[in-house]
């Protein structure tokens, strides 16, 4: 593991954002590890540090604005937008799906960077891409702190991750016995 990845993992460990146990992910998959990025977001100096590393992988000129899904992407999306000097809006859940509210608008052709904390399958990113298209904007890229899919989640735009890390995940009917012995938690996303 390179020194930057070790530094990133240490930030997650120090802030108690990398958890071990038995977790049911938003995707419905089970895992012995969970990235609770909200714990990192308790420490804005660490958020700033992580986002600086992420923004170095992006070209701010490629984007006009930043869109993040609530809740996980809120703090990170706002910090990415601040560091890139871009407008920031967010999507939030209503009736079980992400939508734009609060009178947020998108200009025709406005190029959006979608910022998310963690992806496993990328469902919330896909929802954000659809929101942008439905509102006349242009999905121009995705930036995530942690790509749990190790690059397997695919989008119609370029995806940049700070950390690609694939802890094993399991379908609900294929949980290994050692993990099944631990009570499952829904830690929230």
Image (cartoon, rainbow, N blue to C red):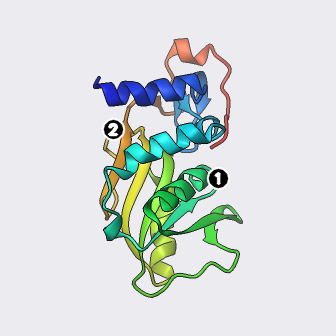
At label 1, counting other C-alpha atoms closer than 10 Å, the crowd grade (few under 14, some 14-19, many 20 or more) is some
80 or 130, nearer to the observer = 80
Horizontal and vertical percent for residue 84?
Answer: 43, 62
Secondary structure under tag 2 reads loop
> Which disc is residue 150 wearing?
2
Which comes sooner in the sequence, label 2 or label 1? 1
Percent x, y of residue 68: 54, 60
Q: How many marks?
A: 2
Above or below residue 173? Residue 111 is below
Q: Quadrant of residue 105?
A: bottom right
Identify the residue under disc 1: 71
Quarter of the rendering occupied by the C terminus: top right
Which of label 2 and label 1 is nearer to you? 1
Q: Nearer the viewer, residue 143 or 29?
A: 143
Task: Where is residue 116? Give x, y as percent.
Answer: 50, 52
What residue is rendered at 47% in x and 57% in y? Answer: 83
Query: Is the Cβ of the residue at disc 2 closer than 8 Å to that at disc 1?
Result: no
Report the quarter where the N terminus lies.
Answer: top left
99 versus 13 height, above or below:
below
- Is residue 120 visible to us here? no
26, above or below 138, in the image: above
| Image coordinates for residue 98, horizontal then vertical, percent | 61, 65
């Amino acid at each position: 593991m390179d020194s930057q990845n070790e530094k990133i993992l240490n930030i997650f460990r120090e802030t108690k954002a990398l958890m071990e146990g038995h977790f049911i992910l938003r995707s419905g998959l089970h895992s012995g590890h969970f990235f609770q990025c909200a714990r990192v977001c308790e420490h804005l100096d660490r958020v700033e540090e992580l986002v600086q590393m992420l923004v170095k992988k992006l070209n701010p000129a490629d984007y006009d604005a930043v869109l993040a899904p609530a809740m996980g992407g809120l703090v990170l999306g706002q910090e990415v937008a601040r560091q890139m000097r871009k407008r920031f809006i967010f999507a939030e859940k209503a009736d079980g799906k992400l939508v734009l509210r609060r009178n947020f608008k998108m200009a025709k052709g406005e190029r959006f960077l979608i910022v998310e904390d963690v992806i496993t399958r990328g469902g919330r990113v896909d929802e954000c891409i659809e929101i942008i298209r439905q509102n006349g904007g242009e999905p121009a890229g995705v930036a995530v702190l942690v790509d749990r899919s190790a690059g397997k989640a695919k989008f119609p735009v370029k995806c940049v991750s700070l950390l690609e890390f694939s802890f094993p995940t399991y379908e609900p009917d294929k949980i290994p016995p050692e993990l099944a012995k631990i009570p499952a938690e829904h830690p929230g996303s």
